């Protein structure tokens, strides 16, 4: 997997937007075989014109995911990047919105893993899940998004242990803020925000190097990790200041 000269068979979920779209384009430019999974027809058509094999698929439909992925002959690398974000505004806790974010972010990932894992076991490949630096410390309004990403962190780190005997490598990607359609809704400061090109480069470099955790940019992720180890009162005050309107 670390041999950059080998042509890889790569499946990318969330390939029609944001980081996933940039990854698909960059891997295609490197000459790899890319299965682009998404639901945006125009984005899929563009990727297909660049050489990708498009997979028009609702990842929330488990049976269709299992069927579609079962038809793919070979996968060396699976990058699961599909997801969404909605914020909650207290004092009203919107359980519908909360469960929507949790269901989409965990559902698309779990269905993708179930469908593609047999291929990765056969190829001794690598599974990659996209988490978020928001999982390091609690932030107001990110109750749903942060909870889903914290769950993804736990899942991927657990899979690193449980899939090791099957020779499947697992990487957790922990990005900070990245310029995507998802982050355009943010009405708060986003320090050290990255372009999708920068994000793609960091992820591809981390995968090529075989890193279990791929964090970027370090100048954001490292302070957040440190902050997460401090007493609750400290990060609560920081979070309140960041999200204060």
Image (spheres, helix red, strand yellow):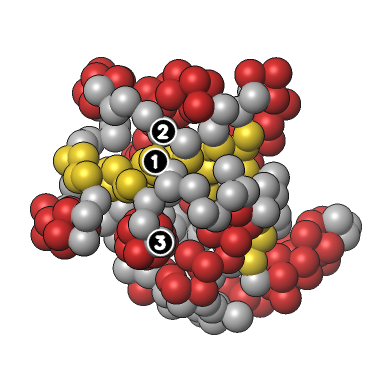
Residue at the spot 86% in from the left edge and 56% down from the top edge? 229
Give the image location of residue 238, x and y in percent. Answer: 72, 71
Give the image location of residue 154, x and y in percent. Answer: 66, 35
Seen from the viewer's position, the closer of residues 241 and 61 is 61
Graded by Cα atoms within 10 Å as few (under 14), some (14 to 19) or many (20 or more), the crowding at tag 1 reads: some
Seen from the viewer's position, the closer of residues 174 and 127 is 127
Residue 30: mark in rendering: 3
Question: Secondary structure beneath disc 2?
Answer: loop
Mark closer to the observer (3, 2): 3
Ranked by sequence position, the earlier of labels 3 and 2 is 3
Residue at the spot 54% in from the left edge and 33% down from the top edge? 125
Q: Which residue is mark 1?
A: 9
Give the image location of residue 193, x and y in percent. Answer: 54, 78
Seen from the viewer's position, the closer of residues 188 and 240 is 188
Question: Secondary structure beneath disc 1?
Answer: strand
Marks 2/1 in contact by CB < 8 Å: the verdict is yes
Give the CA separation, mark 1 to mark 3: 12 Å
Residue at the spot 63% in from the left edge and 34% down from the top edge? 169
The residue most toward the front is: 5
Give the CA separation, mark 2 to mark 1: 5 Å
Name which quarter of the figure residue 227 lies in: bottom right
Relative to 213, does residue 133 appear above or below in the rendering?
Answer: below
Q: Which residue is mark 2?
A: 75
Seen from the viewer's position, the closer of residues 235 and 22 is 22
Question: Secondary structure beneath disc 3?
Answer: loop
Total numbered badges shown on the rendered structure? 3
């Amino acid at each position: 997997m670390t041999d950059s000269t080998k042509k890889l068979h790569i499946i990318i979920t969330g390939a029609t937007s944001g980081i996933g779209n940039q990854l698909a384009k960059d891997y295609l430019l490197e000459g790899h075989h890319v299965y682009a999974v998404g639901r945006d027809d125009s984005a899929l058509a563009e990727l297909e014109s660049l050489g990708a094999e498009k997979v028009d698929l609702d990842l929330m439909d488990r049976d269709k995911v299992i069927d579609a992925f079962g038809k793919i002959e070979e996968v060396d690398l699976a990058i699961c990047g599909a997801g969404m974000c909605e914020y909650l505004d207290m004092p009203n806790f919107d359980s519908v919105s909360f469960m929507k974010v949790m269901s989409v972010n965990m559902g698309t990932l779990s269905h993708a893993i179930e469908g593609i894992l047999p291929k990765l076991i056969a190829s001794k490949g690598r599974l990659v899940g996209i988490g978020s630096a928001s999982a390091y410390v609690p932030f107001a309004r990110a109750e749903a998004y942060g909870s889903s990403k914290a769950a993804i962190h736990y899942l991927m780190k657990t899979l690193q242990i449980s899939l090791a005997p099957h020779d499947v490598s697992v990487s957790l990607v922990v990005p900070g803020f990245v310029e995507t359609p998802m982050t355009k809704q943010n009405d708060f400061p986003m320090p050290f925000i990255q372009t999708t090109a920068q994000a793609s480069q960091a992820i591809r470099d981390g995968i090529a190097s075989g890193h279990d955790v791929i964090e970027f940019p370090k100048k954001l992720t490292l302070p957040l990790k440190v902050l997460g180890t401090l007493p609750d009162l400290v990060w609560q005050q920081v979070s309140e200041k960041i999200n204060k309107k």
